[in-house]
Structures are given as C-alpha cells and as structure tokens.
Image (spheres, helix red, strand yellow):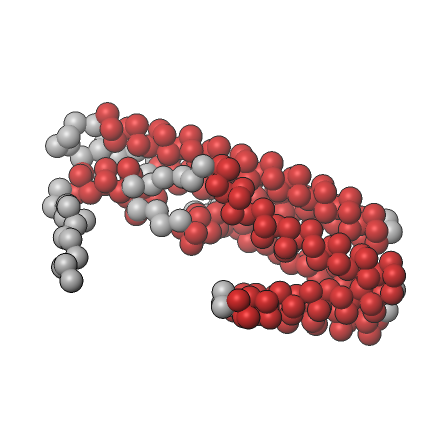
C-alpha cells in the first residue's frame, strides 16, 4: 500500500502575517443554493410537518389527539434516524422530552395555549440572550457561526468582523423579539388554526429575511477583510484596525 502523501505546505507558517493571510483566504461561504438544499429538508421536518401533523389530528380528534400526534411525530423521527443509522443527537432527545412535558401539561389543563406558550417564552429568552451579548462584546451570533463553520482566530479578531457579529446579534435579538410578540398576540387573540398557519408564515418570512441579510452581510464583510490582506505587501503584517 502506498504511503499517504505529505501535505504540500506546512500548515503553520513561521511568518505570522502569512499565517493571518492564509487563515483569511481559507474562509469560504457555501453557495446560497447549497445552503438552501441543506436547510430546506430540516425546515420542513422540524417546522412545517409538526404543524401539519398537530393541526390535522387536532381537527379530526381534538386536543388530546393533536398532542398525541405531535409526540408520536417527534419520537417517530428519532426512531427513524436510529433505524437508518444516522445517529440521534442529545439536543434532539432533549427537544423530544420538552415536547412530551408540554403535551402532558396541555392535556392536564385541557388548553392548547399551554402547549404553545412555553416555546414562545423560550423564544423571548433567546432574544434577551442575543441582546445581552452585544454590550458584553461577546456576540452570540459569532458563537453560533463558529460552531457551524470553523473560522480562523485572526479573522475573528479583525475589527470589521467583530462589528459585523455585534450588529447581526442585535438583528437576531430583534427578530426573535418580534417572533415572540407575534406569537403571544395571536395565541391569545386568534384561533389555534389561525395561530398555527398565519403565525408560522409570518415567523418564517421574518426569519428568512434575517437569514438573507446575515449571509449577505457576512459575504460583504469577508470580501472587505480578504481584500485588505490581498492588498497588503507580502512581507508586511496587516495594520491594526482602529477600534
């Protein structure tokens, strides 16, 4: 068997400036169509399908039937992943337990409002977390981005990048806050059917717009940062950005 080929270049160059430029050029955003193909099945499975399953069972069998269908859908999804060998994440298991508790409370109180109130309050909490991360200069949007895409430390330390993540954290705080307000108003003033479909459409449109702004903003930020490093002399370290 042939020995594995050695890397063509040392991954940790001695020159810090070269390392920083290499880190910046390594950052690439997937095409928007690729992101949509990746996200759409999960969106349908996690957002559209549970609403359809709950409402269909609710219309045919009443509240308890809808709650049972929602719980069955979640655990059925876990069983399907396990059977296909895709693995079941701890977050998915926690989400299933949360749905079970919500369904049990709603069945005990005979109120669909109880079932939908808890995730709405959770959305409000997430909004506050994004907002609090801005004055602390530890933007939650940056943490989430680096969990999904490995970003070089030199890139994250750039002042333009830091400002971008602070602004995007503020944007998502406003989005989640609007989501919670819409949900609470419709939950207490509209029928369950109107709440499920109209609220889902409004929240989806709001989230899609914020996601598009986030992707566009990151691409723009990335072009500026990589452009600065491409314009810098080959042997010179990039000048520090003004605070």
Q: Which residue reaches farthest front?
A: 1
Judge from the rendering whether residue 195 lies leftward or rightward of residue 29; answer left or right: right
Q: Nearer the viewer, residue 51 or 95?
A: 51
- Residue at 60%, 70% (x, y): give it: 79
Q: Which residue reaches farthest top?
A: 231
Above-or-below relation of 134 to 97: above
Whether residue 60 is visible to the viewer of this picture, yes or no, is yes
* Residue 219 location, quadrant: top left
- Residue at 66%, 53% (x, y): give it: 47
- Residue 108 in the image: state x and y as whole percent: 82, 74
Judge from the rendering whether residue 48 lies leftward or rightward of residue 62; answer left or right: left
Looking at the rendered image, the quarter that the N terminus falls into is bottom left
Whether residue 169 is visible to the viewer of this picture, yes or no, is no
- Residue at 26%, 42% (x, y): give it: 23
Looking at the rendered image, the quarter that the C terminus falls into is top left
* Residue 178 location, quadrant: top right
Number of numbered tags placed on the structure image: 0
- Residue at 20%, 43% (x, y): give it: 19
- Residue 148 in the image: state x and y as whole percent: 43, 51
- Residue 151 in the image: state x and y as whole percent: 35, 47
- Residue 139 in the image: state x and y as whole percent: 46, 48
């Amino acid at each position: 068997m042939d020995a594995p080929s050695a890397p063509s270049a040392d991954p940790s160059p001695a020159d810090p400036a070269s390392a920083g430029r290499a880190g910046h050029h390594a950052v690439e955003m997937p095409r928007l169509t690729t992101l949509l193909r990746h996200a759409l099945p999960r969106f349908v499975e996690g957002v559209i399908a549970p609403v359809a399953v709950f409402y269909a069972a609710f219309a045919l069998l009443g509240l308890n039937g809808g709650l049972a269908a929602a719980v069955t859908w979640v655990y059925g999804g876990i069983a399907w992943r396990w059977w296909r060998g895709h693995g079941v994440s701890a977050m998915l298991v926690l989400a299933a337990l949360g749905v079970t508790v919500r369904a049990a409370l709603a069945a005990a109180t005979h109120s669909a409002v109880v079932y939908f109130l808890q995730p709405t309050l959770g959305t409000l909490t997430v909004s506050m977390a994004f907002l609090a991360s801005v004055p602390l200069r530890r933007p939650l949007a940056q943490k989430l981005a680096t969990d999904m895409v490995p970003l070089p430390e030199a890139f994250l330390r750039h002042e333009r990048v830091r400002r971008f993540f602070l602004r995007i954290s503020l944007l998502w705080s406003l989005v989640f806050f609007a989501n919670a307000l819409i949900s609470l108003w419709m939950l207490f003033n509209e029928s369950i059917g109107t709440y499920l479909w109209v609220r889902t459409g409004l929240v989806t449109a709001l989230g899609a717009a914020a996601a598009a702004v986030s992707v566009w903003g990151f691409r723009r930020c990335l072009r500026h940062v990589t452009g600065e490093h491409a314009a810098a002399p080959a042997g010179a370290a990039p000048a520090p950005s003004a605070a």
